[in-house]
Image: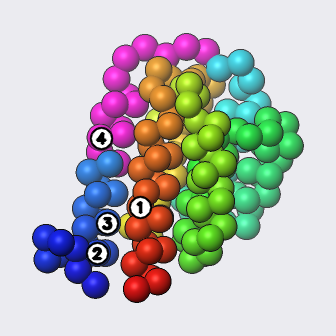
Amino acid sequence: MTSPSGKSLKATLARACSIAAVAALALALAGPVRGQADAGITKMLVASYDLLEAGKLAEAQKIYAQILKQDPGNPLALNNLGAIKVKENKLPEALSYLTQALDRAQGYKIQVNRVCDMQGLCLAFRPLEAVYGNRDLAPLVQLNLSLVKAKVAAEKK
C-alpha cells in the first residue's frame, strides 16, 4: 500500500516515528524538571520500560498492571502497554490503551530518558528516574494513537 506521496505506508510510518522520536527527545530533554511525587511509581516505570526494551513483554506488562493498581489511569503506563500490544500485533487492544492514555495525558508532565520504537508504529517512553519533566505527554500519545489508527485503517483496505 502506498501513501499519497507514492511512498509505502510502512516507510511513511517509520519515517514519522523516527522524526517523532527525535523531536520528542529534543523537547523532553530541554528545560528544568520538578520532583516526582511518588518515586516508587517512577522506579516501576523505569524498570518496566527496561524489560519492554529487552523484549521481556510479559514481565513488563505485570509491572504496568501493578502501576495501574497504585495509580489508576497512569498515562505513561497506559501508553507503554499500548506499545506492547502493537509489538504483539494486537492493534485493537493497543488502540484501547492509547485512547485511555490520551484521555489522561493532558497536563501529565514527563522528562523522557529513552524512546523505544515498536514495529515502526508506536513509541514507548522511559522517564528519567525520580523526576517528572516539563513536557506534556499528550502530544506524544496522540502521535502513537494516530499512527496505530492509520495502520488499522490500512489493514481494512
Between the C-alphas of marks 4 and 1, the distance is 16 Å
Q: Position of residue 31 (x, y in %)?
A: 37, 17
| Pick the front one: 62 or 2 | 2
Quick check: 130 left or right of 65?
left
Dot 4 and dot 1 residues touching (CB under 8 Å): no
- When the figure is inspected, residue 85 is found, relative to residue 89, above or below; the finding is above
Question: Residue 26 magenta-drawn?
Answer: yes
Tell me the amino acid under the disc marked 4: Ala
Tell me the amino acid under the disc marked 3: Leu
First along the sequence among labels 4 and 3 = 3
Give the residue pinned by disc 1: 147
Highlighted magenta segment, given as a residue range: 21-35
Tell me the amino acid under the disc marked 2: Leu
Between the C-alphas of marks 2 and 4, the distance is 21 Å
Q: Element type at marker 1? A: helix
Tell me the amino acid under the disc marked 1: Leu
Q: Nearer the viewer, mark 2 or mark 4?
A: 2
Q: Element type at marker 4? A: helix
| Pick the front one: 152 or 94 | 152
Q: Residue farthest to the right?
A: 69
Name the residue: 23% across, 80% down.
2
Q: Is residue 118 visible?
A: no
Dot 1 and dot 3 residues touching (CB under 8 Å): yes
Between the C-alphas of marks 2 and 1, the distance is 10 Å
Q: Element type at marker 3? A: helix
Give the residue pinned by disc 3: 13
